Amino acid sequence: MNPYPSKLLENAVSELAKLPGIGRKTALRLALHLLKQDVSEVEAFGKAVIKLRNEIIYCRDCHNISDSEMCAICSSTKRDHAIVCVVENIRDVMAIENTSQFSGVYHVLGGIISPMDGIGPDELNIEDLVNRVSSGTLSEVILALPTTIEGDTTNFYIFKRLKEFDIRVSTIARGISIGDELEYTDEITLGRSILNRTPYENQLNSK
Amino acid sequence: MNPYPSKLLENAVSELAKLPGIGRKTALRLALHLLKQDVSEVEAFGKAVIKLRNEIIYCRDCHNISDSEMCAICSSTKRDHAIVCVVENIRDVMAIENTSQFSGVYHVLGGIISPMDGIGPDELNIEDLVNRVSSGTLSEVILALPTTIEGDTTNFYIFKRLKEFDIRVSTIARGISIGDELEYTDEITLGRSILNRTPYENQLNSK
């Protein structure tokens, strides 16, 4: 027997349960919560989600999401447009922006190379990155991709594609997190952090 | 600085973060997930939620949610309309229906008496329950409310209101859950389960 007392409820639960990390029990809780809200609030909720999907624009330069043809970062005159930080997705842009340590611009790949998931270089905004570099206005590309096999593969692929251009390609520093104990750090990270040791003066300067 | 690259995104995140148990980080993850879906899917999602709130009907007899004026349970001829099970909310109806052990009908209170939250008897569908009982067609009211102070208070209030009528009022059995060990059961539940012991034949019959 169908446990839902209403088709409308069943439908709403099915839709909510499609969200990642939300099962049918949680979806039911959310649906019953929405039922208790004012009509206007639920309409605002539903419309905000539809509007997001229908009206979102991707920045023509960096592919970050934006409200206009060019995002706020790419159109800012305060940013250094010669330094491009390559990230996997929009969340990474927000994470780096939160640090207030980067004044360049971004390039959002929209994913990383992952043959297992059927994602090759053509599915990502890599060709566009090569075009940006070939324009000759950039001085450095910073690769800020995850430290996974897929991230390393993508790093290497981009590095090869940019080899022909006269541009500096760097990756963000890998090492021991601030506040972490040496003895609990995995040996690969610890080993890399010794190989890639930085002059003490650099650390003084960054304070 | 505003960390959101787009007003549309910020708005959708704010709306999603209003859902219970969903913080801004999860809301962002959900919003970015929705951005990757087809326009038609996101529209179906938003519309299902709005439609649920706008078109839902509460059964005029039991106050369960329904697609018509009378819910499927109240309009079924296979149910015993003389036995009414009083529950706090719609989820409890679904939980009891899942057991397939109850063939009567329901009465959804829409909450329980909780002075701390400003919920008194007038905020609940109690008057309506009294009216159902006063019609004289019912033989038994089963109280299936939570075993909390609020649940006990509501049980007692309903019991007092129904005292003047010639009707049996019972509560669902409290005792040790099936599969539970005696030694780990709290003393109040264990004490009650001894006081409210049931004849062994009853257990044989229920198998």
Image (cartoon, coloured by chain):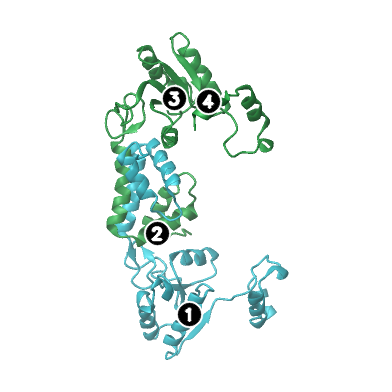
Chain colours: A green, B cyan
Q: Is residue A104 above or below residue B64?
A: above
Say whether mark 3 and mark 4 are on the same chain: yes
Q: Amino acid at mark 1?
A: Thr
Question: Where residue A202 is drawn, which disc sits there?
Answer: 4
Q: Position of residue B117 (x, y in %)?
A: 41, 71
Question: Is circle 1 on the same chain as circle 2?
Answer: no
Name the mark nearer the viewer: 4 or 1.
4
Q: Which residue is mark 2?
A: A33
Question: In which chain is the residue bearing label 1?
Answer: B
**C-alpha separation, residue under disc 4 versus residue under disc 3:** 23 Å
**Residue bearing mark 3:** A86
Dot 1 lies on which element? helix
Q: Earlier in the sequence, mark 2 or mark 4?
A: 2
**Amino acid beneath label 3:** Val
- Chain under label 3? A
User: Nearer the observer, disc 1 or disc 3?
Assistant: 3
Q: Position of residue A168 (x, y in %)?
A: 46, 15
